[in-house]
């Protein structure tokens, strides 16, 4: 049987899973969490646009640390409602990141009435919307830009799924449509046409021949990679296509700017076809020399890993707030049809952050 803490956070996770919150549809879960926190005596403020801030605000005598979590999930795959047993909670968003939201809520509720003398850190619990969409649509960047209290945080802990290890930094993300132009014609006389699929194949073959490039920061190795994630061509089975397209996803490490990333993608792809950049998100810097991050790393007691993906730590860094990734979900479970989070991992995340808030007194 799970212990009381694991069971409580597990039930909270299931409660959140069962409130559908696909990107752009977060208002119901936002309203629910607002009611839960306010009903539990937590100081909580509705920031609008499906966002909340709960817990302590900026003070002068103790460090202020933001815990960040997004309300939205990817589209359902028949995995709502969720389920719970003696070891795990399963369902849409269990790992990414309703388990983390449940930990945040339970920490905020538990903090009501705790004397200031028992804290060495003030937590702010920041819940926001539209993280699963392109970064240009995220509510977080404008939220940080508009709120001086949020900008003054000494550290942000973005509770993305990390398996309860600290993952530092994050990859940047650049996506583009790659268009190959030929000349259409009858499939019975292909020598009179110029098959755009063949041009696409040449470009994709050249791209897939590229090996990942390793970049090291503070002993952490990030891999720069470019992938084709979809292709489209053809209008009929007896027509040689005059146009074909591919979607290219480029993941680049800290230290490469957006401008440099887009220029590199063009230099690789444009010898074969034209590129139209559809969206870019900056990389996040490795911020583990921060004293608070170092304290959290010591409590976790596991080697720090690089975040081989994009997360909102990049948005916090752009706002001048050092940030790391830490959360109970397993990265491999995120977005899967059988997504789940272990009850023990939920309790472990809670206990680490509870100790982080109180250690030093």
Image (tube, rainbow, N blue to C red):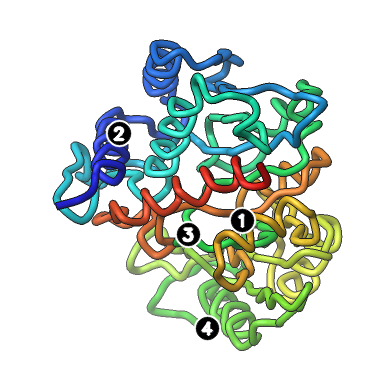
Say which element carries label 2. Answer: helix
Q: Which residue is mark 3?
A: 164
> Residue 183 or 279: which is nearer the viewer?
279
Q: Residue 310, which numbered label?
A: 1
Circle 1 packing at 10 Å, graded few (<14), some (14-19), many (20+), is many
Residue 256 can be seen in this image: yes
Q: Which residue is mark 4?
A: 191
Q: How many marks?
A: 4
Q: Is residue 248 left or right of residue 91?
A: right
Q: Which residue is mark 2?
A: 12
Q: Residue at x 35, y 41 (%)?
A: 75
The answer to which of marks 1 and 4 sits earlier in the sequence is 4
Point out residue 299 in the picture as x, y percentages from the top left corner.
58, 59
Q: Residue at x 41, y 32 (%)?
A: 106
Marks 1 and 4 sit apart, C-alpha to C-alpha, by 45 Å
Q: Residue at x 40, y 75 (%)?
A: 187
The relative height of residue 128 versus residue 209 in the rendered view (above or below) is: above
């Amino acid at each position: 049987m799970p212990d009381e803490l694991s069971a409580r956070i597990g039930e909270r996770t299931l409660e959140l899973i069962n409130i559908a919150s696909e990107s752009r549809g977060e208002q119901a879960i936002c309203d629910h969490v607002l009611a839960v926190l306010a009903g539990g005596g937590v100081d909580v403020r509705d920031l609008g646009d499906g966002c909340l801030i709960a817990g302590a605000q900026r003070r002068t005598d103790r460090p202020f640390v933001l815990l960040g979590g997004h309300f939205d999930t990817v589209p359902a795959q028949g995995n709502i409602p969720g389920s719970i047993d003696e070891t795990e909670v399963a369902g849409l968003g269990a790992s990414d990141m309703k388990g983390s939201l449940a930990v945040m809520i339970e920490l905020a509720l538990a903090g009501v009435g705790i004397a200031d003398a028992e804290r060495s850190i003030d937590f702010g619990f920041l819940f926001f919307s539209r993280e699963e969409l392109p970064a240009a649509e995220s509510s977080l960047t404008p939220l940080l830009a508009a709120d001086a209290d949020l900008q003054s945080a000494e550290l942000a802990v973005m509770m993305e799924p990390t398996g309860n290890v600290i993952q530092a930094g994050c990859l940047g993300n650049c996506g583009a449509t790659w268009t190959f132009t030929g000349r259409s014609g009858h499939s019975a006389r292909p020598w009179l046409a110029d098959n755009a699929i063949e041009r696409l194949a040449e470009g994709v073959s050249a791209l897939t021949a590229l090996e990942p490039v390793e970049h090291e920061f503070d002993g952490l190795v990030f891999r720069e990679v470019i992938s084709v994630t979809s292709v489209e061509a053809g209008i009929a089975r007896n027509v040689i296509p005059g146009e074909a397209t591919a979607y290219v996803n480029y993941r680049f490490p800290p230290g490469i700017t957006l401008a440099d990333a887009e220029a590199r993608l063009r230099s690789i792809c444009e010898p074969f076809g034209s590129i139209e950049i559809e969206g870019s998100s900056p990389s996040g810097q490795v911020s583990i020399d921060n004293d608070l991050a170092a304290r959290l790393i010591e409590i976790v007691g596991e080697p720090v890993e690089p975040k081989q993906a994009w997360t909102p730590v990049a948005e916090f860094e752009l706002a001048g707030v050092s940030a790391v990734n830490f959360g109970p979900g397993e990265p491999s479970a995120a977005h899967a049809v059988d997504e789940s989070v272990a009850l023990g991992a939920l309790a472990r995340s809670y206990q680490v952050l509870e100790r982080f808030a109180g250690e030093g007194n």
